[in-house]
Image: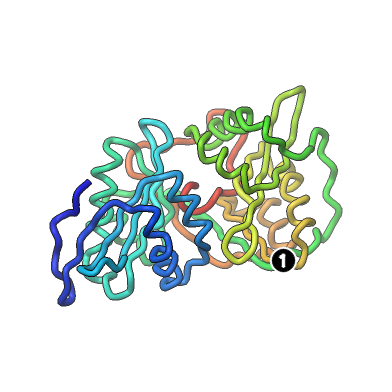
Amino acid sequence: MAYRTAKRRLGYEIAIRPMAEADLDQLHQLSIGVGWPHRPEDWRLVIGLGHGVVACDAIGRVLGSAMWWPFGESFATVGMVITSPRLQAQGAGRELMDMIFAQSGTRDLRLNSTKAGYRLYRSLGFEAIGRVFQHQGKALPPAAPVAALPGLRPVVPGDLDALARLDASAYGADRHQALAALLSTSVGTLVERDGAIVGFALCRPFGRGHVVGPIVAEDDAMAIALLTPHVEAHQGEFLRVDTAQEQGAFGAFLESCGLTIFDTVTPMIRGRSHGPSGPARIFGLVNQALG
């Protein structure tokens, strides 16, 4: 894709071009500038799984970014939409999103909006569908013993296909490629019943410590049982879980383990909503970009 026609903003020209692996260092600095915790390794993961565009000035400095991740031909997520403070009021975010729309075609889109981006996304046709709660903190041991769940065991590489099928039934789209990438850096727990995997949780390094996600489970009790080994493994360390579960035992368990609500974002959709087709639900996000 060629450079888009450059536009002059604040006395200098801005052009939009495809994102490349070579942009990683500048993208990392861009996210640091807006207070996001992503490490270069976290950027490398999302770049490897998706497509993106960057806004650059005349000497090649990256001042804005936006990405999207296709999960099949009818659905995609959007994220890593960042503009430097000096561009935030200049309409660069809208131009970046226009490029995402052009690339993603007719797919239904989902994103998690920060407070700063909400008005822009509403103006672009996205509708709010709830809230996601960012729980994080130094992990504490569970306040009360967690009941053992039959069939709980570690994830092994050979579980990938079964995990992907279960995840698709809970998430509403096929994330096989993303899960394969996550497994290479994650420690996982799963629940097996009658030879079938019915829940799982993956924990990996991210940001200031570790994140647990996705967490796929049939109910709060299963989600808690899947999460507990990861909480115990990281006691005294920074741990994060992003969840749309506002009330109930799962949220209370997170709080009791020292993972308090740090922030919230707003899930939004443009087009048709994609949801679960079976009993399993998403209790923990991979991250706010991939859902």
Q: Position of residue 100 (x, y in %)?
A: 29, 48
Q: Which amino acid does label 1 sit on?
A: Glu
Question: Which residue appears farthest toward the top when viewing the image?
Answer: 194
Task: Tell me which residue sits at (38%, 57%) in the image.
Answer: 22
**Quarter occupied by residue 95:** bottom left
Q: Position of residue 125 (x, y in %)?
A: 28, 49
Q: Position of residue 76 (x, y in %)?
A: 39, 40
Q: Is residue 239 left or right of residue 79?
A: right
Q: 34 or 250: which is nearer to us?
A: 34
Task: For label 1, count other residues whose C-alpha is less than 10 Å away and answer few (under 14), some (14-19) or many (20+).
Answer: some
Q: 269 or 109: which is nearer to us?
A: 109
The residue carrying mark 1 is: 237
Q: In this view, does 197 lie to the left or right of 46?
A: right
Q: Position of residue 122 (x, y in %)?
A: 30, 55
**Quarter occupied by residue 12:** bottom left
Q: Is residue 66 above or below residue 259?
A: above
> Element at badge 1?
loop
Task: Tell me which residue sits at (50%, 61%) in the image.
Answer: 40
Q: In this view, does 192 lie above or below 127?
A: above
Q: Is residue 75 left or right of residue 192?
A: left
